[in-house]
Image (cartoon, grey):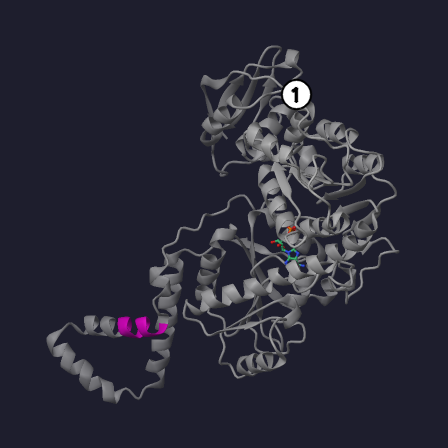
């Protein structure tokens, strides 16, 4: 990975050849990383792991997809090491904005810490308290929590933070957006002053800087340099991204490949395991596929390279490490099965295509949460990445027919059809010549197009409004003010029905908009950006929500508490509007 992918304090230079072992991780963690198929640390990991192992505080700028979870999970696990028996006083606390992230981060800690025997408890809104209390009472090394729920447990006395060694604030900007600023302060106050703190945030607005100033001690800073254009080194390549949920990525890739019909595509995956899995799935789609990763012997790799050079491979699926020394001229497409962990890695990858004056094509499959990485790539490369919708089975079918048509046209132009004319004449005595031609076309089509496309009826959801730059909702949106810039959507944007819910708690109960946004997002697990106007009266509050989410929110809030109290929640009848 390039050295200058991120900027780190001088005492922790990001060196190119750092391996996980060189970063100071012990054998148990290295074993798990190998089992997961990780070949090398990402830039944020190279910069963050050594100082965190040393016990330094850290302020890191990193979005989802950069490998930031491992950047703090691995050193934290290393620090708590073979902790004695699990304790009622956890050693590690990670605060995250949403329950989805709480689950993801818990899984990551669990996976990385398997050989160390580390125990992890996630606590988040929307899950029964009882279950979480039982888990906490059993004792644990690591707690991953959303701030609202962590505070609830602190108040009930079911979470003891007095033995904490380390705290991480993950996606701190998101937590502030969701109104958790005050909760974070209260939680941090309940932790020992001696604790080590790491703060990760995709953006570093002044609000984050001020939290860092108050709660981090002489932190190491790991930042993405601003406006660092790599334009000079950018090859001329057509760049497209498709936004696809993880579960649909392979189906989406299959369609994109069918549509693009590459001469040779180099497909990048993050881990060895992903390379092997994807290669296997693509073979099933009728492509000639070879895998290339660091776990293969030199002989195997030589064999693959020979095949790729002799044009007897359609798709080469590889990790960054394996593709590093690769020298093949005729790569027509580079595909990023995931957005690479840094813009520099992206530039490096797509430089494999578009050689020798040919037009290169770069395709990136991004998950909805990885939008910020794509933006970073655009802003650093000063080139646009077009966001497209995944082709439908009909698009693929039309394209395949086009290819068959092209192939038949070539045969027509080449002539030498005499041997076949007789057959056509004979059949034409019995059938309409147009039908005869259509039947021959069908045979040719099925022989070349295979059956994969015909069977592909999987529904791949279209992710809308991705291409627009994200605007942050104000922390406390006053009534009528646009949240997240969405209300400013002009004509032509998707109208969505909004309903209003009534919550029987208001100003007198010290309810703030942030409490409602936090409770709704975490108890009901809905995206806070969908929340509309919030009105807080003395005795009640009204919250506007997408109609589709209303019942879920009402049910979730009925089972939860607001400021420690159960409240009545119902639909505000008769209210409905579109936005
Ligand atoms: P994150 O940015 O923490 O959301 O991580 C993004 C994805 O990258 C997760 O699926 C991780 O499992 C994966 N990942 C993290 N570090 C590495 C690495 N060094 N090599 C390969 N995959 C990684």
Left or right side of 444 for 293: right
- x%, y% of residue 469? 63, 44
Q: Which residue is more in the foreground, 67 or 466?
A: 67
Callout 1 secondary element: loop
Q: Quadrant of residue 229?
A: bottom right
Q: Which region of the structure is painted magenta?
A: 441-448
The quarter of the picture where residue 103 lies is: top right
Tell me where residue 430 sits by quadrant: bottom left
Q: Could you tell me which quadrant the N terminus lies in?
A: bottom right
Give above or below for 256 relative to 425: above
Residue drawn 41% across the image and 67% down it:
285
- Tell me if 54 is positioned left or right of 410 in this view: right
Q: Can you identify the residue that label 1 sits on?
A: 512
Toward the viewer: 301 or 265? Answer: 301
The answer to which of 404 and 164 lies nearer the viewer is: 164
Q: Is residue 236 visible?
A: no
Residue placed furthest toward the front:
85
User: Measuring 82% from the left and 36% from the top, which residue is drawn there?
Assistant: 215
Counting the numbered discs, the total is 1
**Most foreground residue, 327 or 13:** 13
Residue 250 higher or lower than 501, as above or below: below
Q: Is residue 445 magenta?
A: yes
Q: In terms of secondary structure, what is the magenta stretch mainly? A: helix
Q: Is residue 180 left or right of residue 104?
A: right
Q: Quadrant of ligand 1?
A: bottom right
Binning the other alpha carbons within 10 Å of mark 1 as few (below 14), some (14 to 19) or many (20 upward) gives some
Residue found at x 61% / y 61%: 35
Residue 254 position in % (x across, y down): 45, 62
Residue 414 seen in render: yes
């Amino acid at each position: 990975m390039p050295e200058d992918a991120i900027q780190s304090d001088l005492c922790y230079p990001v060196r190119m050849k750092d391996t996980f072992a060189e970063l100071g991780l012990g054998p148990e963690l290295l074993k798990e990383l190998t089992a997961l198929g990780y070949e090398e640390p990402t830039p944020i990991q190279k910069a963050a792991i050594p100082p965190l192992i040393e016990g330094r505080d850290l302020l890191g700028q990193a979005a989802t997809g950069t490998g930031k979870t491992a950047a703090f999970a691995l050193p934290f696990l290393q620090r708590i090491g073979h902790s004695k028996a699990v304790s009622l006083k956890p050693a590690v606390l990670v605060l995250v904005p949403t329950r989805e992230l709480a689950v993801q981060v818990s899984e990551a800690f669990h996976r990385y810490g398997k050989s160390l025997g580390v125990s992890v408890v996630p606590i988040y809104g929307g899950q029964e308290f009882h279950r979480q209390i039982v888990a906490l009472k059993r004792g644990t090394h690591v707690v991953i929590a959303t701030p609202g729920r962590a505070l609830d447990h602190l108040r009930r006395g079911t979470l003891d933070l007095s033995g904490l060694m380390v705290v991480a604030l993950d996606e701190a900007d998101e937590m502030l957006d969701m109104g958790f600023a005050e909760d974070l302060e209260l939680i941090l106050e309940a932790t020992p002053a001696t604790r080590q703190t790491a703060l990760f945030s995709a953006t570093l607005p002044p609000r984050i800087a001020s939290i860092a100033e108050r709660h981090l001690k002489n932190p190491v800073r790991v930042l993405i340099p601003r406006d660092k254009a790599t334009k000079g080194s950018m090859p001329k390549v057509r760049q497209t991204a498709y936004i696809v949920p993880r579960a649909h990525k392979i189906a989406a890739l299959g369609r994109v490949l069918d549509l693009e019909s590459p001469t040779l595509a180099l497909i990048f995956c993050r881990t060895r395991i992903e390379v092997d899995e994807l290669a296997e799935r693509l073979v099933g789609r009728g492509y000639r596929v070879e895998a290339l990763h660091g776990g293969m012997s030199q002989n195997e790799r030589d064999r693959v390279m020979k095949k790729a050079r002799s044009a007897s491979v359609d798709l080469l699926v590889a990790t960054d490490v394996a593709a590093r020394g690769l020298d093949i001229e005729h790569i027509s497409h580079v595909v990023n099965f995931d957005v690479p962990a840094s813009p520099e890695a992206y530039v490096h990858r797509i430089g494999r295509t578009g050689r020798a004056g040919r037009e290169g094509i770069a395709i990136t499959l991004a998950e909805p949460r990885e939008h910020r990485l794509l933006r970073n790539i655009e802003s650093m490369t000063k080139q646009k990445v077009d966001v497209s919708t995944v082709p439908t089975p009909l698009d693929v079918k039309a394209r395949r027919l086009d290819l068959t048509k092209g192939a038949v046209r070539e045969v027509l132009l080449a002539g030498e059809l005499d041997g076949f004319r007789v057959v056509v004449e004979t059949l034409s005595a019995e059938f309409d010549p147009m039908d005869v031609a259509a039947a021959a076309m069908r045979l040719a089509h099925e022989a070349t197009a295979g059956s994969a496309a015909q069977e592909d009826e999987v529904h791949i959801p279209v992710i809308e409004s991705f291409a627009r730059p994200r605007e942050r909702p104000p922390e406390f949106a006053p009534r009528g003010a646009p949240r997240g810039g969405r209300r400013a959507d002009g004509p032509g944007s998707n109208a969505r029905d909004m309903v209003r819910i009534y919550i029987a708690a208001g100003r007198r109960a010290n309810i703030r908009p942030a409490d409602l946004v936090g409770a709704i997002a975490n108890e009901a697990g809905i995206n806070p950006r969908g929340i509309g106007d919030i009105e807080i009266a003395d005795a009640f509050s009204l919250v506007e929500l997408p109609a589709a989410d209303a019942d879920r929110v009402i049910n979730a809030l009925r089972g939860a508490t607001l400021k420690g109290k159960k409240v009545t929640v119902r639909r505000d009848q008769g209210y409905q509007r579109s936005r």
